[in-house]
């Protein structure tokens, strides 16, 4: 179903609605229960760590990102297309160009949603990062979910946080936690809580109803009660605003955190995300929700 502003894909038990102007998912429901509030927003930034900030200024990672405007990208929609490749599949795809204000270099992103008759969605993202930056924090997409979907289970590195250069003590296994049951462990809020080498994860309510996200290859993820920009803006955990949703960040690749010292650019080369072309996919599947009379 299509009108001037939206495209709605509806099956027997699910509904997915897309904004044609923004080219993004605005809601996903199953049996009338909302499971996604927004989806597949490009995400290339992280809340700078102390190492990212270094001694301040554009000579350090965070200063370079902010000088470019990585924390306030302008997103220009190039095209939005809607088609039905088969009786049991609908395709919604969008292309966008994201860039810093008054910058000609940027990120060209194509996001494709393949919605199947069973309500599962395959999300494909192709990114050409043609930017004048020495290092990117991440290549990923962000979704938001209702606050009651806070039961997190994942198969990947755990049980504590892990990053590509901080995972030796994080064994591959099946783990469970509650989103932000413990607050950010740092006095100044920064990037935290990441999980490396994730094969799949699920976010459900206390009854086990929610969504499972599974990759075609291992990926990085985190889930928090605040956005990346909330963490970047706060100078103390008490400054983090109360929100009404959970932010889910799915990264094809996420730069390491460094740590040789706290005052130089020391994220090792092999752990850096560089500008270039990236392509990845994952599948979203509803789980645990049954029809009620």
Image (cartoon, rainbow, N blue to C red):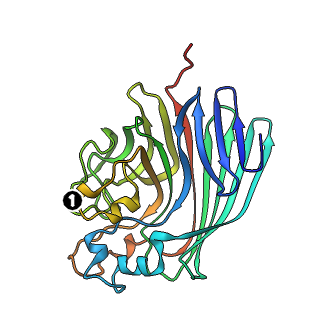
Left/right placement of residue 120 relative to residue 187 reads right
Q: Is residue 98 above or below residue 283?
A: below
Residue 27 pos. (x, y %): 59, 42
Image point (54%, 21%), residue name:
290
Picture quadrant where residue 232 is located: bottom left
The residue that appears at 31% across and 65% down in the rendered structure is: 165
Q: Is residue 159 left or right of residue 211?
A: left
Secondary structure under tag 1 reads loop
Q: Is residue 195 visible?
A: yes
Query: Quadrant location of residue 84?
Result: top right
Q: Is residue 168 visible?
A: no
Q: Which residue is mark 1?
A: 186
In the picture as drawn, the residue positioned furthest to the bottom comes out as 59
Please identify the quadrant where the C terminus is shown.
top right
Q: Position of residue 263 (x, y in %)?
A: 22, 80
Question: Whole-percent x and y of residue 54?
Answer: 26, 79
Classify the position of the N terminus by image quarter: top right
Q: Nearer the viewer, residue 175 or 112?
A: 112
């Amino acid at each position: 179903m299509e009108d001037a502003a939206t495209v709605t894909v509806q099956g027997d038990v699910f509904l997915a609605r897309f904004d044609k102007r923004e080219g993004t998912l605005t809601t996903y429901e199953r049996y009338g229960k909302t499971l996604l509030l927004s989806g597949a927003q490009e995400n290339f930034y992280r809340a700078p760590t102390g190492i990212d900030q270094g001694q301040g200024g554009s000579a350090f990672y965070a200063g370079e990102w902010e000088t470019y405007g990585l924390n306030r990208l302008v997103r220009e929609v190039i095209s939005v297309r809607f088609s039905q490749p088969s009786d049991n599949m609908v395709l919604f795809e969008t292309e966008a160009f994201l860039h810093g204000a008054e910058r000609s270099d940027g990120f060209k992103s194509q996001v494709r949603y393949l919605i199947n008759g069973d309500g599962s969605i395959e999300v494909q993202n192709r990114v050409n990062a043609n930017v004048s930056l020495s290092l990117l924090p991440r290549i990923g997409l962000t979704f938001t979910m209702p606050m009651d979907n806070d039961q997190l289970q994942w198969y990947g590195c755990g049980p504590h946080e892990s990053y590509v250069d901080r995972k030796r003590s994080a064994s591959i296994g099946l783990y469970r936690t509650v989103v932000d049951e413990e607050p950010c462990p740092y006095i100044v809020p920064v990037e935290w809580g990441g999980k490396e080498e994730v094969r799949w994860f699920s976010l459900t309510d206390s009854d086990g109803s929610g969504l499972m996200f599974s990759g075609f290859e291992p990926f990085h993820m985190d889930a928090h009660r605040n956005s990346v920009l909330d963490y970047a803006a706060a100078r103390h955990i008490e400054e983090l605003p109360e929100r009404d949703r959970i932010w889910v960040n799915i990264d094809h690749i996420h730069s390491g955190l460094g740590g040789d010292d706290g005052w130089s650019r020391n994220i090792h080369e092999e752990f850096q995300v560089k500008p270039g072309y990236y392509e990845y996919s994952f599948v979203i599947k509803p789980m645990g929700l049954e029809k009620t009379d």
